[in-house]
Image (spheres, rainbow, N blue to C red):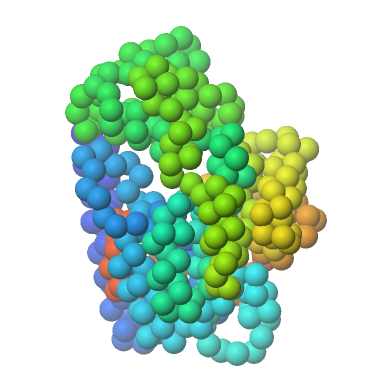
Amino acid sequence: MRHGLARLVRHHVRRAAIAGGLETAHLLSRAGLMSRARRRGAIFTLHHVRPSCKRTFDPNAHLEITPEFLDEAILALRRAGYRFVPLEDLPMSLAAADPQPVACFTLDDGYRNNLDHALPVFERHSVPFTVFVTAGFVDRTHSLWWETLADWLSACREIRFDFGQGEEAMAIGSLAGKQAAFDRIAAHIHKEDEAGAVAALNRAAARDGIDALAIAERLTMDEARLSALLESPLASLGAHTISHRALARLGDNEARLELLNSSERVEAIAGRRPLSFAYPYGFCPTVSAREHRLAADLGFAVAVTTEPGTLSSGANLHALPRISLNGYFQNARYVSALASGIPFRFAAA
């Protein structure tokens, strides 16, 4: 219990520190200082876009923004002089001499609310965007473990889970206990055998009435909805693997097939090969130089990480940074601060 409370305290302290840093970056940007940090522009990462719904236990809240905040973010970037371009056109934009910064919007995993709530905002502002499709979610063969885990822990006061040494009972009656369990199981999943750990999670959750594949069906777009999304000329699809596993932990052939097969699945939906790819999780050590080479060899024009940063003309097009629009920091000032690149200069100092 004490460990869970300590995690919550550290979490709130960290959020307060980040908010303070973003406020400072916003003021520096408004004053015209460190203008070179903005460089050529930025790619933004989103996941859920949906109306706010207060949940008692919500460990994935950082992956969710409201349509109203997306609207504010677009307006803030437009006021700051950004030009919105499709992600697949980014190489041409970075190579051009035009000094106007560019912004690209990307949405990972293919949530249904991207069609229901994000699309109307993008259409209102004529902003292009790319949805990265995990084929296993579309075909209901793979689960979103972080969503399964959140639903399972929310529904129970005690759980049993096998960390590889036999089942262990965990009391999770408090929010601190639920967060501690979420963190511990998530860390276990991020170990070497991700597929095995996710399968164990799905089995354990099923005993308590949680259907992992039903969650995927409820939350993500199927082929028909993705086709409906593509009726908008602003929308494009990118590949995001079959299983959403950390590619750097897979063997050479398995990693290659994750990229290749997901590209072919997106082609079957969209009618053309996708030119963009997003690495699952997207941060080191889930992505390595091997995956950058694979993406290039398989013909993707761009591939994106979740490493934070702004864009430069000489950037590796198969290891591009992105800026997350985080659900904890839904403020237009913070969008401008992040796009300025100043927080990343501070982080690198």
For residue 311, say whether it is visible: no
Quarter of the image for residue 236 reads bottom right
Q: Residue at coordinates 69% horizontally, 42% vertically from top-left? A: 258
Quadrant hosting residue 141: top right
Q: Is residue 82 above or below residue 56?
A: below
Residue, x 66% and y 54% (percent of image)?
A: 269
Left or right position of 275 against 190: right
Up the image or down, 48 lies above or below 60; here it is below
**Quarter of the image holding residue 219?**
top left
Q: Split into 4 quadrants, where in the image is the C terminus? A: bottom left
Q: Nearer the viewer, residue 87 or 328?
A: 87
Residue for point 32% across, 61% down: 66
**Placement of the N terminus among the 4 image quadrants:** top left
Q: Is residue 262 left or right of residue 121?
A: right
45, 136: nearer the viewer: 136
- Residue 130 placed where, x, y %? 56, 64
Name the residue at the bottom extreme: 98
Horizontal and vertical percent for residue 40?
A: 55, 79
Residue sitting at 56 percent across and 30 percent down?
Answer: 194
Q: Is residue 118 visible?
A: yes
